[in-house]
Image (cartoon, rainbow, N blue to C red):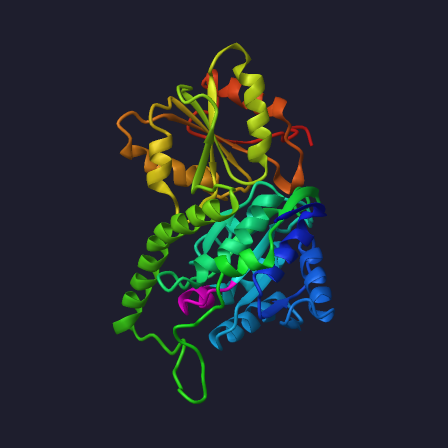
């Protein structure tokens, strides 16, 4: 049976990687990701996991080593955050273009400057077009489960793409929660050993990543895009199988609150749970608001979101990053661009919250609801909590 324990979420991620029997771990420490790879280095050193732990000199090297190991046929894991993810930038596109099933935890943290070690989503939003499958967890149990499922999704022969599992820095990484740690035997049944389709082998030489001349480059990008879009069906399958085997259900998007409510909050990441609590304040005097929580960020779950937003009059999108020089945050921009497909298009209100780790309370989400009800900030964004005289 699964064992429920109180554990720091970062250590729970390390346990998930151990249960997944990762064979190569290449990482460089960066706050707030460090506890994950520190724990994994200890697990490997103690002989609890038969794996190669590669302590590299930078995140650029970490992803380079991960690509080399994955191309050689190993099950590979890495983790990073913020400037570390930015330093990987060049190599992230190679991992997805080569169709390598690497799994990476991103402990979401603000990008400099000014220097900030606290949480928002500016790091992953700067990399949203890297060609990776990208999912978000709202709590420690979800991140634990999603980490194991990520290996299964990535390594499916119909997918063969890297997966980034996002967890909010400090808010989740350093929080101690009650987590169900599954048995190794059950995980082995769910996640069999990785069998690569193509790998670097001196006995059977192949080339990976050669020059793409203009006559083939567009076709290569097309097949990569098709693979990412079609991975959505596999993700659904894996979520369903996980629910059947372990009893915890996941969907591409999650909904809660009264279905008939015409105001909809859209959230992604740990603030979604605060908004859930805020609905209790908002709906005291009737069914006024509901919520849609995005779990799958790439490929973007447009079909599921459109279905969930049917009947909405106002949509309040909570962003955790600024998309500089545009009229919306990155999530709101995606939502707004698809709403023309609805017969009745709702008004969009975009609040960019929690930048640099600033707290956002459920009372403040109630205030956002009230502003939307009054029609303030319609079709524009507001960076929440800015002190105008500072």
Query: Magenta region: which residues?
Result: 93-102
Indicate the position of residue 263 as horizontal and vertical percent values.
Answer: 44, 22
Q: Residue placed at 39% from the left, 73% from the top?
A: 197
Identify which residue, 366 or 159, lies in the foreground.
159
Image vertical order of residue 51 relative to residue 256, above or below: below
Q: Residue placed at 46% from the left, 45% from the top?
A: 244
Indicate the position of residue 316 as horizontal and vertical percent values.
Answer: 47, 28
Determine whether, in the image, residue 311 is placed left or right of residue 179.
left
Identify which residue, 231 or 21, lies in the foreground.
21
Residue that lies at the very extreme toward the front in this rendered image = 1
Q: Specify whether residue 34 is in view.
A: yes
Q: Specify whether residue 327 is in view.
A: no
Q: Residue placed at 57% from the left, 64% from the top?
A: 77
Q: Does 99 lie within the magenta span?
A: yes
Residue that lies at the very extreme toward the bottom in this rendered image = 203
Image vertical order of residue 265 relative to residue 113, above or below: above
């Amino acid at each position: 049976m699964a064992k429920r324990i109180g554990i720091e979420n970062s250590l729970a991620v390390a346990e998930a990687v151990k249960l997944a029997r990762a064979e190569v771990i290449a990482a460089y420490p960066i706050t707030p990701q460090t506890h994950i790879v520190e724990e994994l280095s200890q697990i490997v050193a103690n002989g609890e996991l038969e794996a190669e732990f590669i302590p590299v000199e930078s995140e650029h090297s970490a992803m380079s080593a991960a690509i080399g190991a994955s191309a050689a046929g190993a099950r590979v894991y890495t983790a990073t955050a913020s400037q570390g993810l930015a330093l990987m930038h060049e190599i992230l596109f190679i991992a997805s273009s080569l169709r390598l099933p690497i799994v990476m935890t991103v402990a979401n943290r603000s990008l400099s400057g000014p220097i900030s070690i606290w949480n928002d989503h500016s790091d992953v939003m700067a990399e949203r077009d890297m060609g990776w499958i990208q999912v978000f967890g709202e709590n420690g149990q979800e991140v634990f489960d999603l980490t194991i499922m990520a290996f299964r999704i990535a390594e499916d022969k119909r997918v063969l793409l890297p997966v980034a599992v996002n967890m909010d820095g400090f808010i989740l990484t350093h929080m101690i929660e009650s987590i169900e740690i599954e048995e190794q035997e059950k995980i082995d049944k769910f996640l069999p050993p990785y069998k690569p389709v193509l790998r670097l082998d001196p006995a059977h030489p192949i080339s990976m990543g050669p020059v793409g001349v203009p006559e083939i480059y567009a076709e290569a990008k097309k097949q990569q895009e098709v693979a990412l879009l079609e991975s959505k069906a596999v993700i659904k399958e894996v979520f369903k199988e996980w629910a059947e085997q372990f009893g915890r259900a996941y969907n591409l998007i999650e909904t809660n609150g009264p279905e008939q409510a015409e105001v909809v909050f859209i959230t992604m990441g740990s603030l979604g749970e605060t908004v859930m609590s805020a609905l209790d304040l908002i709906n005291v005097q009737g069914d006024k608001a509901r919520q849609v929580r995005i779990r799958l960020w790439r490929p973007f779950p447009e079909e599921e979101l459109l279905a969930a937003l049917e009947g909405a009059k106002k949509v309040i999108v909570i962003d955790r990053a600024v998309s500089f020089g545009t009229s919306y945050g990155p999530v709101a921009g995606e939502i707004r661009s698809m709403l023309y497909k609805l017969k009745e298009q709702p008004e969009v209100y975009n609040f960019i919250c929690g930048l640099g780790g600033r707290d956002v309370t459920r009372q403040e989400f109630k205030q956002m609801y009230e502003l939307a009800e009054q029609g303030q900030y319609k079709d524009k964004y507001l960076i929440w909590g800015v002190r105008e005289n500072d």
